[in-house]
Amino acid sequence: MRNLIMLTAALLTATILNVSCNKDRGIKPSIEIDETNLTACPANTNCESLFTEHAQFVPQDGIKKLGVYRLFWASTVSSGMTSTIYVEAPMEGDTFSLGKEDILAGRVKFLQHCQGCNTIGYKPVDGYVKGRNLTPDKRADQTKWLLEIKIILGVEGNTSFTQTMYIKQYFYPNFIYD
């Protein structure tokens, strides 16, 4: 009888510890992004904010390949200069949040191309990206995402050259299922 009581107490204690230590497992905090104060496309430029699924970006190749991410990109083109930021977000879920660790791991990339220009090779070194699907009840090729991106761009080995990039914009699909 005593062994049965000890076994029951041990199981009850283990269950309570397991539940209390894992109470947040599987529950993600809600990502809130208000739809006000969207960033405007600068004067005399063309901008686009798009996404595709099951992709990734390889800077060396300059192409998107089949991958495990929902790939978002925002480009600004003006008289010979193209600046693009790429965000590799998880495929699952209707929201996501990336932080400094994700940025340093290469999930956010910045490319700037200019023919005949001398540009500083900036790369993302800090910041955050938050995203929310505004139409989760629609098919992927009909959805609209809202992203808020704040990225600190820096020059490797030199902390005095930094630039902050902020984008808050709607992103639309760049693929068709039908």
Image: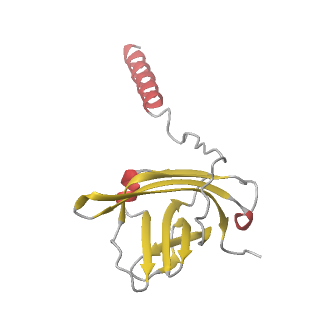
Judged from this view, the residue extending furthest toward the front is: 43
Residue situated in front as seen by the camera: 138 or 24 = 138
Residue 160 in the image, given as x and y percentages of width and height: 26, 57
- In the picture shown, does residue 113 fall above or below 109? below
Judged from this view, the residue extending furthest toward the top is: 2
Residue 68 in the image, given as x and y percentages of width and height: 51, 67
Residue found 49% across the figure and 67% down from its top = 86
- In the picture shown, does residue 7 fall above or below 111? above
Q: With 132 as the anchor, is 6 left or right in this view?
A: left
Q: Where is the N terminus found, in terms of image quarters?
A: top left
Residue found 59% across the figure and 56% down from its top = 39
Number of numbered markers? 0
- Rendering quarter of residue 5: top left
Q: Where is the C terminus found, in terms of image quarters?
A: bottom right
- In the picture shown, does residue 15 fall above or below 175? above
Q: With 104 as the anchor, is 168 left or right in this view?
A: right
Residue situated in front as seen by the camera: 138 or 34 = 34
Residue found 44% across the figure and 20% down from its top = 8
Residue situated in front as seen by the camera: 157 or 66 = 157
Residue 71 in the image, given as x and y percentages of width and height: 54, 67
Residue 23 in the image, given as x and y percentages of width and height: 50, 32
